[in-house]
Amino acid sequence: MKEAIMSSSAMIVVSNRLPFILREAEDGTLHRKQCAGGLVTAVAPVVVESGGLWVGWPGIHLEDPDVAIPESDPEDKSPTAGLKSKQVLTVNFDEDVFDSYYNGCCNGTFWPLFHSMPDRAIFKAEHWADYKTANRLFAEKTIEALEQMYAEKGDELQLDDEAPLVWIHDYHLMIAANTIRQVAEEKNLRCKLGFFLHIPCPSWDIMRLFPWDDEILQGMLGCDMVGFHIEDYCFNFIDCCQRRLGCRVDRSNMLVEHGGRTVRVRALPIGIPYDRFKTLAASAPQEIADSQQIILGVDRLDYTKGLVNRIRAFERLLEKHPEYINKVTFLQVAVPSRTDVKVYQELKEEIDMLIGQVNGRFTTPMWSPIRYIYGCISHEQLAGFYRDAAVALVTPLRDGMNLVAKEFVACQNEEDPGVLILSPFAGSGAQMMEALLVNPYEIDDVAETTHRALTMEVDERRLRMACLRRREKAHDVTYWLRTFLKEMGTLRMEDGDSVRPTQLMPVSIQDFDEYLRDYIRPTDRVALLLDYDGTLAPIAKLPELATIPVETKRVLERLANISSVNIAIISGRSLADVRGMVGVGNITYAGNHGLEILHPDGTKFVHPVPSEYESQLGYLLQALQDRCCRDGAWVENKGVILTYHYRQVPSDKCETLVAEAREIFHKYGFAPSMAHRAIEARPPVRWNKGRASIYILRTLYGLDWQEGVRVLFAGDDATDEDAMRVLKGMAVSFRVTAMSSVRTMANRRLPDTDSVLMMLKWVERQMAAAPRPRRSTPPTGSSPPREKVLQYQMSMEEKEMQHIMANGRGRGRGGGVGTTRPTATELPTGA
C-alpha cells in the first residue's frame, strides 16, 4: 500500500466469511487457508494495519465455538498474514440453518436475482426465515465486537469522541444493520454503520420479484451510508427505495430519507493493493514458456463469469485462425465455489466436458490448446500468470466490479504489456475504457477481438496499458478506503452543524445550463415544440380542469415576442380546444396530434381522413358509451379522434374495464393507441406528432431547417414519443415524467410541469433581445373568418407542400425569408 490509512474511528468489518478459511488437519489442529477474493484482497490489509476486528463465518462448522483461531503461518504473504487471532470473531451456525441461508437464500435467490438472471432464482419462505436468523446471529456477534472494542479502547474512544465504525459487506448481510443499530442504542454503544454491496444492485423490476424486498431495502437503510461500485447501481437502489418504500429521495445528491434519518448512497469503485501486485509480479517465477502466447482467464467457477462462452470463443478462434495451433494456449484458472450446490456441480461438469472436446479436437503431440487449473493458487503464482499472459479474458456475463482486470493491469510489464479484453457488463467495464470491450454473448466477436489482441502492435499495447495502469495506481484500495471514510464522516453531525440535505430540491433554471448551454446560443434561432396536458398544464381529472399556470402563460407570451423564437403547441386535444386553453397569440397550434395545424397568420392545415373512418367512429363511440362508460370512465369526441378516458376509474377496476374497452376497439376495426390513462382511436393515416413536427418546422423555416434551427421538444406521454423518435439527433427532447422506469427516446427527463416552466425561463433568459414588431394576429379567443380557413384548408391540401418541396421557402419569422405565404400547396398523401 502507498500509505497506512487509519480510520479516525475504530473499524469492525462484518462479512459472511472471514478473510481466510479454516481447515482441520489430521491431528485435529486448525490451519488457515488463503484463497483469492475481491473483499479479502482489498480490505484485509486495512484491517490489519488499523488494528480493527473482523466478524465472519470461518468456513467450517466448529464443534467448539470457543476454539482458538490459529495465527497465520510465518511464511504467509497473503493480505491476511498480519491479522491476529484476537482480531477475529467467528459466527457459528447450525448446519441446516447455514445451508438454507447460504445455499438456499444467498446463492439460490439473491445471487442470480441481483445478477439479473431471475430465471435461475428460487423463492422459498423457509430460506428467507433462515436468512433472517443468520443475519441476527451476525448482528449479535457484531454487538459482541463493539463491546470488546469499547472494553479495550473505551478511554481512547471517549478522548477522540469517535464512535466505532461498523462496515457491513455484501448481499449475505443486507438486514443485519437494523438489529445492530437497535441493540447498540439499547446498550448505549455508539457506532456508525456503513454497508457495501459487492455485486450489482438490480433495477426495480428485478428487485420487486423478491417477495420480501421491502425488508431487504429497509435493512440496508439501517446504515448511515450505502455504497455500490458504480452510479448505475446507486440509482437502481434509490429508485427501489422510492417506489417500494415511498421514501423521499434526492437523486442529484444521492440521498434517501428513511426512519427519520438521511442515508447517503454513494458510488465507490473498489480498487486493489496495486503496489503489492506490482511487487509480486516483479519477483514471481516464470512458469510460461517464451515460445507460447498465453490467453489467461481467472475466475471463480460461477455461471455469471461466462466461462462456457469464453471456451467456445477460444474454440472459434482456432477454427477461424488455425495459425494459432501449437502457438497459443488458453490458461483458465477456476477457483472452486459452492461445490455443494447442484447448479455449480453441473457447471463444472459442463466445463470439464467442453474443455475435453476442444482439447480432443485440436491437441497435437507437443501441444494442448487449453490448460485448466481447478483450485486455489497462491498470489505469487497468480501474479506470474498475469505478468506473462499476452491476453487476459475478463468476460463475465454480469459482475459487480471484477478485480481480476485490475490485478492483471497492475502486473504488466511496461515494455511488453499484454492486452485486456473486458466485458462491459462488469463494473470495471464502466471505468477501464482503454481495454478492448466485448460482448461475451457474441462468440464470433470475442474470437475476433482476441485475434486483434494477439496481433496488436507493441506501441498500441503500451499506450492502452499505460492509461489503465495510471488510473488503477491512483484509484487503488487506499483511495477506495479513504473515499469510504470520507463519505462516512460527512454523515456525522458536528457541533454547530445544523444543516443537512434532507429534502428534494426542485428543478431550477441553472439545471438547464448543463442541459442546453452547449446546444443553444443567444444568436441561434429556436423552435419550441410543446405538448399541453402534462407538459404545460398539470394533468387533471377532467380535460377542462387542466389549465395552464399563469406564470407559464406569461413566459410563453414573452417568448412569442422574441423574433428568433417560434413556438408550436402540439396536443391531443382538438385544435379549437388547445387554442382556447393556451390563449397566447403569435404561436402555432396543432390539435388532434397534428392532424389540424393553425399558424399565426391564419393559414390552416387539415390532414384528410377516409370517409368510412368517420362513420365507423360513430359506432365505436356508441359502443363505448353503452358498455364502458362506468366507474368514472367517459368518452371524449374530438371530431377526427375519439378518446376513452379512465383516469378516474378505481385502480382495482381498471384492468377489467381497459380490457373490455380494448376489445371493443378491435371489434370495430380500430388499433387502440394507449395514452396517459386513456385509449385513443385515430384515423388510419401515417400522421402523428412526429410527422406534424417535421411539417411545422418545414413550413416555418424551409426544407433546410435543420441547418440553423435549434429545436426543443417537450412532452409527457407515448404520443409525444413519436416526435422524440423522429427528431432524435436533430433536437433536444424532454420527457415530463415522475416515473424513472418509463422508456423514452428523450434526451432528458423532467419531473413535472414546473420543470418545463424552468426550461422556458431558461430559453427566455438565453434568447431575450429587443423584440421586433410582429404582424397582427386574430384575437386569442376568436377564429379566422370561416371562408379564409376553408380556402387555406383547400390550398394546403392541394398545393402547399409541393411548393415547399420545390422552392424550400419557409414562412415563419425565423425562417429568414420574410412572412410571405406560399401560393401553391399540396398535401402529401400518407405523409
Image: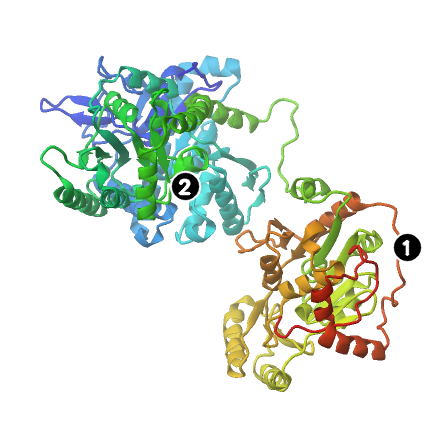
Work out whether residue 109 can be spotted. Answer: no
Query: Does 27 sit above or below residue 314?
Result: above
Work out whether residue 821 can be spotted. Answer: yes
Q: Secondary structure at mark 1?
A: loop
Q: Decide: few, some or many residues near mark 1? Use Cα within 10 Å; few <14, some 14-19, many ≥20.
A: few
Residue shown at the point (41%, 35%) measured from the top left = 428
The residue to which callout 1 is attached is 773
**Residue type at the position of mark 2:** Pro
Query: Does 219 sit above or below residue 576?
Result: above
For the residues labelled 1 and 2, say whether their Cβ atoms are less than 8 Å apart.
no
Q: How is the image coloured?
A: rainbow
How far across and down, in percent of the image, does residue 555 sit? 80, 52
User: In the image shown, does 208 or 499 lie closer to the viewer?
Assistant: 208
Quarter of the image that includes the C terminus: bottom right
How far across and down, in percent of the image, does residue 342 sit? 20, 47
User: In the image shown, does 609 or 799 lie closer to the viewer?
Assistant: 799
Where is residue 614, by image quadrant? bottom right
The residue to which callout 2 is attached is 424
Residue shown at the point (35%, 52%) measured from the top left = 118
